[in-house]
Amino acid sequence: MGGGKGGGKGEKDEGEKEAEGGKYHWQQKGEEIQVRFPAEPPLTKKDVAVTFKRAALLVKVRGEALIDGALASTVEVDECTWCLAPGGVELQVMLTKQREGEWPALLSAK
């Protein structure tokens, strides 16, 4: 039954969508989007490089690009951030939409 916070490995929160290949999960609520990348072995800050652009996102972990592409819409770059979950078991990227509204996908299909 578990009522733990943060979800365990392999668990998805309500409304969360999995990317092709299962490299990440993402969900949106209002003007916020959260993208979660499970990490094994655990990550440190030195392992992560995230570049936010108005209409694009680049997420690299240990030199490998996990996301490198155009976003489905635009974000407020100065309000976007990332963090590591305790123990480095998950990278969390938070995006703030420029305009509230449902995105059909995280990345543009173009």
Image (tube, rainbow, N blue to C red):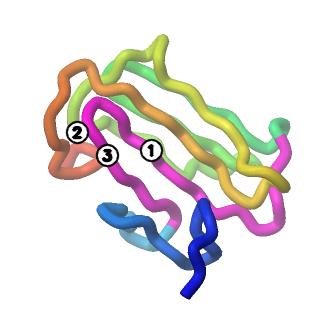
Residue wearing tag 1:
34
Q: How many angstroms separate mark 1 from mark 2 (CA)?
A: 14 Å
Q: Residue 53: say if magenta.
A: no
x and y percent of residue 94 in the render? Answer: 49, 35
Tell me the crowding category of disc 1: few under 14, some 14 to 19, or many 20 or more residues within 10 angstroms, Cα based.
some
**In terms of image quadrants, where is residue 81?**
top right
Identify which residue is drawn at 63% across, 43% down: 60
In primary-sequence order, the first of circles 3 and 1 is: 3
Amino acid, disc 1: Gln
Identify which residue is drawn at 82% across, 66% down: 41
| Vertical relation: 100 (above or below) 104 | above
Mark 1 or 2: the one toward you: 1
The quarter of the picture where the C terminus appears is top left
**In terms of image quadrants, where is residue 2?**
bottom right
Tell me the crowding category of disc 2: few under 14, some 14 to 19, or many 20 or more residues within 10 angstroms, Cα based.
some
Q: Secondary structure at mark 2?
A: loop
The reply to whether dot 3 and dot 1 touch (C-beta < 8 Å) is yes
Q: Which mark is residue 28?
A: 3
In this figure, what is the number of numbered marks? 3
Tell me the crowding category of disc 3: few under 14, some 14 to 19, or many 20 or more residues within 10 angstroms, Cα based.
many
Q: Which residues are magenta?
A: 23-44
Residue wearing tag 2:
72
Residue ranking furthest to the bottom: 1
| Vertical relation: 109 (above or below) 48 | below
| Front position in the image: 49 or 103 | 103
Amino acid, disc 3: Gln
Residue 15 is left or right of residue 92, and the answer is: left
The quarter of the picture where the N terminus appears is bottom right
x and y percent of residue 63 in the render? Answer: 72, 46
